[in-house]
Image: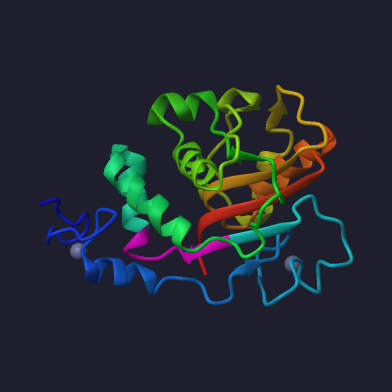
Amino acid sequence: MPRCLLCHCNAHKSGLCQDCWADLCTLQRNNTQLCPRCTSSVSCATICERCQLKRHPVTALYASYCYQAPLQQLLRAFKHKGQLAILDTLAALMLARPPTWLQQGIVDGVLAMPLSRTRLFERGFNQSHMLAAQVAQQYGLPLLPMHCIQRSHRPPQSTLKSKQRHKNVRGVFQVRQDLKNRSLLIIDDVVTTGATISELAQTLKNCGVAQIYAWTLAHPK
Ligand SMILES: [Zn+2]
Ligand SMILES: [Zn+2]
């Protein structure tokens, strides 16, 4: 009998016991749309009122859960240990709460938030790429290869304040494949200020990508 990843009781599904699964489901976000520019919650519009006047490269941004315990512990454990059992749990949680706008034909490809080669070498895998693979499979969409976008190495965003984050990611991505006129879904594990997703989206738009949507597992609030 497989054991629950969190409490070691008998696992029921996706690596968790029924209680821990229910516990994690309480982290589901009610107000599930996030403004792609400022990541504040929006009820029905995709961009908040304050940001509506400015153009933004991301059409809609969505986070499935609040980035709190025990989801935080699960994601950290996965990033440090790379256990596939945890990946399956995280992917199952994510797929249980998809964005409402993700309907047939809206996107034609799935793309994971790239890691720099240094970070990829340290960790040994890209957690977002692994989540993106499961999303792509579930929706029958092609998954863009990891090398189609290169990311330069910079200090981790988590060590910086909000204002520095935008500066830190400027010019960090290079597109290595022709993605003209594509409509892409970016998958990331956690979105905080949205600075990295915005920068990636802007780089993609500059290369002729038509539409960009983003779906993350979690957001702090
Ligand atoms: Zn449990
Ligand atoms: Zn906004």
Colouring scheme applied when the structure was drawn: rainbow
Identify the residue shown where x is 31% and y is 63%: 70
Left or right: 57, with 16 as reference point: right
- Count the numbered circles shown: 0
Where residue 78 appears, as percent x and y from the top left, is 33, 44
80 or 163, nearer to the observer? 80
Residue 71: name its quadrant.
bottom left
Identify the residue shown where x is 65% and y is 46%: 185
Identify the residue shown where x is 78% and y is 42%: 202
Identify the residue shown where x is 71% and y is 49%: 105
Where residue 20 appears, as percent x and y from the top left, is 25, 67
Left or right: 135, with 202 as reference point: left
Q: Find the magenta span and give its range.
A: 63-71
Magenta-drawn stretch contains 70? yes
Residue 194: name its quadrant.
bottom right
Residue 98: name its quadrant.
bottom right
11 or 175, nearer to the observer? 11
153 or 23, nearer to the observer? 23
